[in-house]
Amino acid sequence: MAIRNLELRARTVVEGFWHGLHRSPYHGFSVEFTEYRPYSPGDDPRYLDWKLVARTDRYFIKKFEDETNLRCHLLVDASRSMMFGSRGYTKADYARTLAATLAWFLHHQGDATGLLTFDGAVREYLPARHRPGHLRQLMLALEKPMEGRATDLTAPLRRMTELVRKRGLVVLISDLLAPVAELDAPLALLTAGGHEVIVFQVLDPAELDFDFPTASRFEDLETGRDIFLEPTTARRDYQRRLGEHLDAVKATCQRLGITHVQLSTAQPMELALFDFMKARADRGKIVRRRAAA
Amino acid sequence: MNFLAPLFLAGALAVIGPILFHLIRRTTREVTPFSTLMFLTPSPPRITKRSRLENLWLLLLRCLALVLLALAFGRPFLRETAHSPLPPAGEGRRVVLLIDTSASLRREKLWDDLRAKAEARLRAAKPTDAFTIVAFDLTPRDVLTFEDWNKARPDERTALALQRLGTLKPGSGATHLDAALIHAAELLDQPEQRAPAEIVVLSDLQEGARLDALQGFVWPKNVTVSLDAVVAKQHENAGLAWLPEGDDATPATADTVFRLRVTNSAEAKREQFKLRWPGAPEFDAYVPAGKSRIVRAPKPPPGADRIALTGDDADFDNTAFILPPQTVNTPILFLGTDADEDTHASLYYLRRAFPPTGRQKVEITAHRAVEAVPAFQLQQAQLLVLGDAPSDAALASAAQFVREGKIALVPLADASSAQAAAKLLGVSLPATEAPARDYAMFAQIDFTHPLFAPFADPRFSDFTKIHFWHHRRLDLSGLKDARVLAKFDSGDPALVQLPLGSGSVVLLATTWRPADSQLALSSKFLPLLHALLDQSSRLPAVHAQYFVGDEIALPPGNTPLTIRKPDGAEVAAQPGAKFAQTDLPGIYAVRPGTMRFVVNVAPEESRTSPLGAERFTALGVPLSRDAASTVNAAQHEARAAAVELENRQKLWRWALLACLGVLLLETLIAGSLSRHSPQPVET
């Protein structure tokens, strides 16, 4: 977090994580030709090779590789609870840097990357594209100050499924500090839409350990409510309930087939990127195994 | 006194607040921002060691104000005055109770739970409501119709519905929820009815339920769907399914291995299962959670017809019934003088067109004698092929064979052999040798005829690669009943069907001998002959395995049949009819004869993981708002009555008024106290 420029920060993290391109499983219509296939009734006649028809009187369809390999949408939580930080930077800073890192990494891998920041509603939305200047726009959108309110995934994720019709990868970066019952339906909606979903749950070390030294009034960043607390006496109960919440989130993700990665803001960013790569690779294995079966 | 919102009474506990404030002298002012207070409960601030309460009257007034406020929010009402009936509700609801009776309901106590839910809904029915009960597994069945409900006296309706409900029990069928929902929607789709209509699905809502047909279904207006699921305590379920060999597999031998598919549910913690034939040692099957594995069962002990799986929670799908494939004998009779190994003759190719398979054995008998064909041979034969120069006696046998409903195939080797066909048919059939050209091809083919129907797809309809060097020109002008199935490109008939008695004669104006054509070498030859054999024998297609609810075609014949079901019950059926009472898994035997068939529970019924409501939302099912929760209708009714009473009494207003009064008094006393207390000196 010592580097102020977000793009530079992202670039520094990505160094060393260049694992080569993955090929697209979809066939689109761009410049890169892949194969011929005989025409069968019902195919779009636009893609017939008319020159071949003229020469040989045979009907063939030209197939091309899709222009982009992967459509990835980064969903960044900009709610007030993300403004908490005990290490000189907030969870929001960490989430932004993580989003920027993934965006930079995917962009330079040739993938289309989109961004959606939200609190109770959608704040910023950039559709997934891969074109010059898009990464710059994405960084600018990420650098805008986040002044969100309460975390509510329902409305933004519903909007997201409306906006994004084509299946792809969805990376959700949030602290997921909302009742699990409220998280279940929106996440199920995403997976039901056919998206592959990776959730990065970003938490501050102070949230995990609750090691505040003195008694004071604790103010909820989202609601403004405050209560008086003696941290030494409240710690055990807090950690038990947080643990239950985290277990419930993990169980929900596992049930819905979502990859869940918990990150502490004390962790280096490279580890997060490594987790991302690993999740993608594991998913690839599953898909290949299914295809082989 | 009763309360509409008794939880608000807990607000009275807030009196602790004023008591503490009266005791506390000072608490900390330091504020720590924190991301969420979700997991925190306030710990009481340290209080000063002052045990004496000051301003007791003021404290009592403040406590009283809080108690009155809590009372007002609790919305009190007096039950004693609840004599007046509910105002008329107008036109009542129309409700379809969809009761799942599929095999998966036989788990644990799911069926009892489901019945209890259905009974609660029926008991809560208002006099103006109309109920219908539809049970479903593979198909929906009306158990109680709207007419039945309306015809019954209002006070007897619930009893009637409960009595009909009592007749239901879960069977062994699969869950076709889509068909049931569509049937229910059609029952409710009456544009003249404006009352709200509701479909209540009482089911275990398992993952294996079929929903495909709901894709694109247009739901009628006013109809909502409530999902009321019964939930199993144990989700772990492993299913067992037999994978029979395909129809074209080689004939079964003593060493044939039975393949079984074992599936395990995604939530399962157990991955090791035991399988066993009755009276044989167990063997293991390892299946990870959410996966399926093909297991090769060891050789079964003699007479074993089932294999059982143990090691999971639900038993309903743990037995697979298995029968070794039964070979059906369909003999073909060839009348002619062709030698068996003569590669220039028709019989040589005919013999090679019917290799034995697991399901069918075709024996070709050549009758070369001049005498008539023995009656038993004629009776057994399913197709007759006429070779060259048959004797008159053989022709008479052939005519008798055709008249009884079978087919005779007559390839015309030369113009004179048409005369044999004419004699067989008893008509005049002039034929000449067609003038020699390079070659002829099939040109116009009647793909609507069952013989050519398998070739109707454009991928298979190309017959132009079969070249015919020689063929005969038939004059069909005198035959009105002749149906030309295919013509040569010259326009001459190539394949003609002529009825005779209840059967028919199929004339091929050429042969498949190499001297005449390439037909025997082409990929169409075998399918054509097999289609002809199927047409002639009219034997129903027999599958190695059926699932509960499938219809089974019974063999044709003249004697009435009896089918013995797995539970020992015997059902009479007509030969050639469809047998649909396959409601039990097991082995069914058809008498007279040796036909047996096996019926198993459908494999998708084993997928018992719960189905999410989002699947229904994605398919456009109009779910009602309380769809996800299981609503107790009786409680709803009681609550509605209480709301009504409370609305009329409005006791909360009095409580609020009293609270305001107390607060006013408190303000006055506090004001007077502060006036009389010494003012702090500001520095």
Image (cartoon, helix red, strand yellow):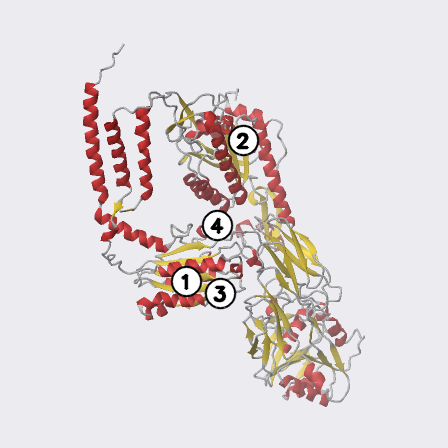
Q: Which amino acid does label 1 sit on?
A: Ala
Q: Which chain carries label 3?
A: B
Q: Which is in the foreground here, disc 2 or disc 3?
A: 3
Frontmost residue, B235 versus B333:
B235
* Residue with the mark numbered 4: B612
* Residue with the mark numbered 3: B169
* Residue A23 in view (yes/no): no
* Residue with the mark numbered 1: B184
Where on the picture, by quarter, is residue A83?
top left
Crowding at mark 1 (Cα within 10 Å: few <14, some 14-19, many 20+):
many
In the displayed structure, A10 sits above or below A70; it is above
Crowding at mark 4 (Cα within 10 Å: few <14, some 14-19, many 20+):
some
**Mark carried by residue A263:** 2
- Residue B57 in the image, given as x and y percentages of width and height: 23, 28
- In whole angstroms, how far apart are the C-alphas of marks 3 and 1? 20 Å
Q: Is mark 3 on a helix, strand or loop?
A: loop
Q: Which is in the foreground here, disc 3 or disc 1?
A: 3
Frontmost residue, B178 versus B403:
B178
